[in-house]
Image (cartoon, helix red, strand yellow):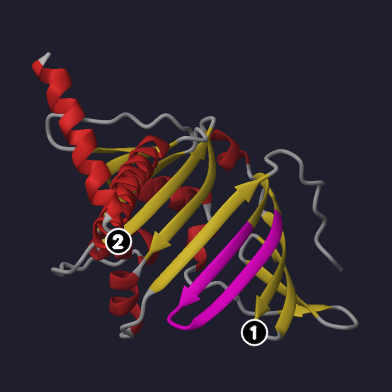
């Protein structure tokens, strides 16, 4: 009875407040405050459910659930986006074993290349001529280099997205990268470089290299540098022939 009486008293109080224009406004804004507060909580909860990040420490080791077999087989399509400060260069290509057919876009400039082992051929209106490698840090296209980088990098965390894709977050020092990419021995104290490996159903779909530290050392240029490579259509590229 006491609870019911208190409930009735609250209802009567709200009715009185509602009759007053100022009280009506207070009730109105109070309702929307509660509404948006609940809405924000729901949105945050939904974002948490969309991805789950696991950090790694000495007592919690995460095993990678991908392999490099299809990348090693060397038959796939790829896109490569190089961001160097404000400048962006993109490459779209087919890769078959030790050959690649690639179109480069840099601003309004478009060029076509054919790669065969260490040879680079640039297409002209009439034929192909020997050209220079257009990639920034070309070794990052090579399977052996990718394998060694991932073996020597430190796995820091893994993010699993709602769609089922995983992202492995690695760190690697410039000292180690210089040894791998350039065969040089250095010993410097510097910020690490970041590598993200994207995986879907155990297949690597992309690798993003954030190389600010390494680039600053190699080029003496303090600009952000990111190389993003996406892989697709494993085993579906036709046999490539070296152009005459």
Question: Does the stretch in magenta take in 89?
Answer: yes
In this rendering, the answer to whether 3 lies above or below 84 is above
Quadrant where the C terminus sits is: bottom right
- Residue 159 in the figure: left or right of residue 92: left
Provide residue 225's location: percent of width, then percent of height. Answer: 40, 73
Separation of disc 1 and disc 2 at Cα? 62 Å
| Residue at image point 42% right, 29% down | 65
Asked if the magenta segment contains residue 238, the reply would be no
Q: Residue at x 80, y 61 (%)?
A: 242
Which of the marked residues, 1 or 2, is nearer the chain's N terminus? Answer: 2
Disc number placed over residue 21 in the picture, else none: 2
x and y percent of residue 26 in the render?
Answer: 25, 57
Q: Is residue 153 visible?
A: no
Q: Main secondary structure of the magenta part?
A: strand
Q: Look at the image and tell me whether residue 22 can be seen.
A: yes
Percent x, y of residue 24: 30, 55
| Residue in the foreground of this view, choosing between 157 and 231 | 157
Q: Residue at (31%, 70%) from the top-left corner?
A: 214
Q: Which residues are magenta?
A: 79-94
Mark 1, residue position: 107
Q: Residue furthest top?
A: 1
Residues under numbered marks 1 and 2 in contact, where contact means CB atoms less than 8 Å apart:
no
In this rendering, the label closer to the viewer, 1 or 2: 2
């Amino acid at each position: 009875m006491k609870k019911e009486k208190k409930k009735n008293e609250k209802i009567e109080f709200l009715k009185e407040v509602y009759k007053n224009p100022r009280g009506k406004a207070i009730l109105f804004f109070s309702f929307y405050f509660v509404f948006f507060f609940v809405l924000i909580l729901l949105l945050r909860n939904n974002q948490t459910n969309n991805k789950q990040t696991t950090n790694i420490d000495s007592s919690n080791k995460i095993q990678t659930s991908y392999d490099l077999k299809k990348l090693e087989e060397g038959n796939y399509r790829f896109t490569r986006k190089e961001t160097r400060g404000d400048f962006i260069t993109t490459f779209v290509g087919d890769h078959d074993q030790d050959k690649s057919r690639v179109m480069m876009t840099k601003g309004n400039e478009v060029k076509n290349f054919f790669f065969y082992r260490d040879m680079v051929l640039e297409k002209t209106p009439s034929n192909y001529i020997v050209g220079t490698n257009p990639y920034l840090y070309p070794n990052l296209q090579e399977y052996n280099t990718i394998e060694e980088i991932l073996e020597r990098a430190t796995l820091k965390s893994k993010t699993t997205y709602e769609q089922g894709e995983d992202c492995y977050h690695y760190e690697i020092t410039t000292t180690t990268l210089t040894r791998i990419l350039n065969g040089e021995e250095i010993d410097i104290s510097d910020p690490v470089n970041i590598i993200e490996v994207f995986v879907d159903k155990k297949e690597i779909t992309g690798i993003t290299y954030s190389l600010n530290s390494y680039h600053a050392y190699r080029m003496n240029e303090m600009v952000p540098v990111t190389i993003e490579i996406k892989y697709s259509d494993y085993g579906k590229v036709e046999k490539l022939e070296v152009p005459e």
